Amino acid sequence: MATSTNYELFKMSGPRDPYPGENGVIKEGALADLLLVDGNPLENLDLIADPENNLKIIMKDGKIYKNTLD
């Protein structure tokens, strides 16, 4: 909720918008922050405490920093 509301405010700032293009979606050309967790963190929050083993993809601003799915 916090990020989507801030995004709406940025979109209203016109040319001062620091995030041109689409955000908040997963598709080609969009900036994305994404964590792919091996399991359901809603059922087991401890999954996040062990990112080495449980985070399969880490993406920030559309750039992949970790991908163990290859």
Image (cartoon, grey):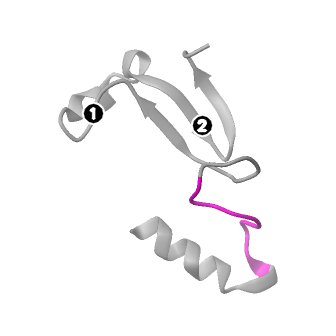
Q: Quadrant of the C terminus?
A: top right
Q: Relative to 67, is 3 above or below?
A: below
- Name the residue type under label 2: Met
Count of numbered marks? 2
* Residue 46 covered by magenta stretch: no
Q: Residue 17's spot in the image, x, y percent?
A: 73, 75
Q: Secondary structure at mark 1?
A: loop
Occupied quadrant, residue 2: bottom left
Please indicate whether residue 29 sits to the left or right of residue 69 in the image: right
Q: Which mark is residue 59?
A: 2
Q: x and y percent of residue 44 in the render?
A: 19, 32
Q: Write down the quadrant of residue 39 in the picture.
A: top left
Task: Name the N-terminal-most of marks 1 and 2.
Answer: 1
Q: Which residue is mark 1?
A: 40
Residue at x 63% of width, y 28% of height: 65
Q: Which residues are magenta?
A: 16-25
Give the label on residue 26, or none. none
